[in-house]
Amino acid sequence: MNVTVVQKSATERELAIELPAADLEKAFEERLSEARKRIQLPGFRPGKTPKDLIRKRYGASLRGEAIDNLVQQSVRSACVQEKIVPVAPGDLSDFEAPEGGDVKFKVVVEVDPEIELQGYADLKFPVETKELEADEIEKALDSMRQRAAEVKDAERPSQVGDLVGATYKRIEIDGVERPLSAPAFQVEIGKGIPEVDAGLTGIVPGADVTIEFTFPDDYADESSRGKKGLYEVLVEKVLTRVIPELDEALAEKFGFKDLSELRARVETDLKATAERSAREAAWDKAVEAILEANPFEVPKARVQDYVQWQYDRMQKQGAQLPPVEEMQKAWAPEAEKLLKRQRLIGWIADKEEIRATTDEVGARIKEIAGMYGLPEEDIREELKRSGRVSEVREELRGTKTLNWLIGER
C-alpha cells in the first residue's frame, strides 16, 4: 500500500492511497468463498454451488462488497501508519478500481489540530462578587410561594396567570407544516408570545383555537426568529394556582422549623449563587483571553456531532424543533465556542498536570448525595455501576483548571 498525505488545512488531511490489484483480487476471492457457504441454488447442496456460477450471478455485488471492505481497512491502516487520528469517517473521491488494475482513491479526514497555548499562566481575573440587594431575598421567597402554589381547575374562562393544557393539532412555520413530535403541552398565560397568550385567554376546556403570530426576534430557537407561525390546538384544561401566604406553615412545607430559618437559608443560597456567577464570569474572561491570543480551529465533524447530540437530547425531552439541518446552522457557532473551551481546558490540565484527587471525588459524591437527599453510598454505587465516576472526576478537573487560570492555585 502506497500512501501520500497532504495537509489541506489545520483540521484536514488528504490521503492518496494506492493498493495493488492483488489485494482486491484476494478480498474478492474471500467474499466469494464466504458467499458460497451461505448461498444455495437449486440443484446444489449447501456449500457445493460452483464458484463460477456464484461469480456469474453475484460477482458484481460481491466485488462491490470487497471494495468497500478493502477501502475501509486500508484507510484505517493508512491512518495508523501516518499517525493520523480521524474524528469522523472521511470523504472519498477520485476512486479507481479497473478490472485487473490497481485500486486508487483519495480520502479527506478531519483531525484535531495540534495546539500550543501561550500566555495562560499569568492571568489575573478576580472573582468580583456583587453585594446582595435588599429585595433579592423577598423575591426569592415569593418565588418559593409560587412553587408551593396548589393547582386546581379554574372552573371559568382562562385569564392571565392560569395554566392552559392543550394538544397541538397542527403547526405551521412560514407556511410549512411541521411534525407533531410532542403534541401535548402546558403554558402559563402571560409568559409566552403575546399573540399566543391572547389566543389562549378567555377560553374553556374543549375549545378549538387557531392562533396566528410572529416568532419574536429573541425566540430561543434562532431558526424560527421573525418567522410566521400558526398553531391549531385543542384546549383540554384550564388550571389556576392558589398561592400560599409567607408564614410559618410555608417554612414547614419546605422543611424548615420556622420562617427565620427559611430566610437564613435563602440568603445563604443567594450568596452562593452570586459567588458562583462571579466565578463563572472570571472563568469566561480567562478563556476568552486565551482563545484570543491563541486562535485554533475545531473540526466541522465535531461541531456537527455535538449539535446532533443536543438535538436528539432536546427531542427526547419533548421539544418542538425544526429539521436538524436548520439547527446545524443555528447552533454551530455556539457549539464551536464550547468545543474550543473544552479543548483549551483539557490541554492546560494535561500541561500543568491538574487532576482531581480521590478525596475531592469523594467530597463531590457526598455533595451530590446531599443534593438528592440520598445515602452517599447509594450514589457512589450508582455512579460506579453506570461508569460515571470518571465524569465526576473530569468535572472536578475542569473546575480546578479554571480556578487555576484565574489565579487560585
Image (cartoon, rainbow, N blue to C red):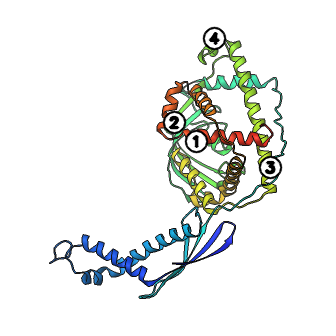
Q: Where is residue 330 in the image (x, y as percent from the top left)?
A: 66, 57
Q: Which mark is drawn over residue 120?
A: 3
> Which residue sits at x=56%, y=41%?
390
Residue 321 lies, with reference to residue 368, above or below; the image says below
Amino acid type at mark 1: Glu
325 and 14: which is toward the camera: 14
Q: Relative to 145, is 7 above or below?
A: below
Determine the residue positioned at 51% across, 36% down.
383
* Camera-nearest label, 1 or 4: 1
Badge 3 crowding class, 10 Å Cα cut-off, few under 14, some 14 to 19, many 20 or more, is some
Residue carrying label 2: 383
Amino acid type, callout 4: Lys
> Can the viewer see residue 205 in this picture?
no
- Ranked by sequence position, the earlier of labels 4 and 3 is 3
Q: How busy is the neighbourhood of tag 2: few (under 14 within 10 Å), some, or many (20 plus)?
A: some
Q: Is the Cβ of the residue at disc 2 closer than 8 Å to that at disc 1?
A: yes
Apparent side of residue 14 relative to residue 279 in the rendered image (left or right): left
Residue under pointer 1:
391
| Amino acid type, label 3 | Tyr
Report how far apart the C-alphas of labels 1 and 4 lie in the structure: 36 Å
Q: Earlier in the sequence, mark 2 or mark 3?
A: 3
**Image spot of residue 71 (x, y percent):** 47, 74
* Alpha carbon separation for disc pair 2 and 4: 33 Å
* Residue corresponding to mark 4: 257
Secondary-structure class at tag 4: loop
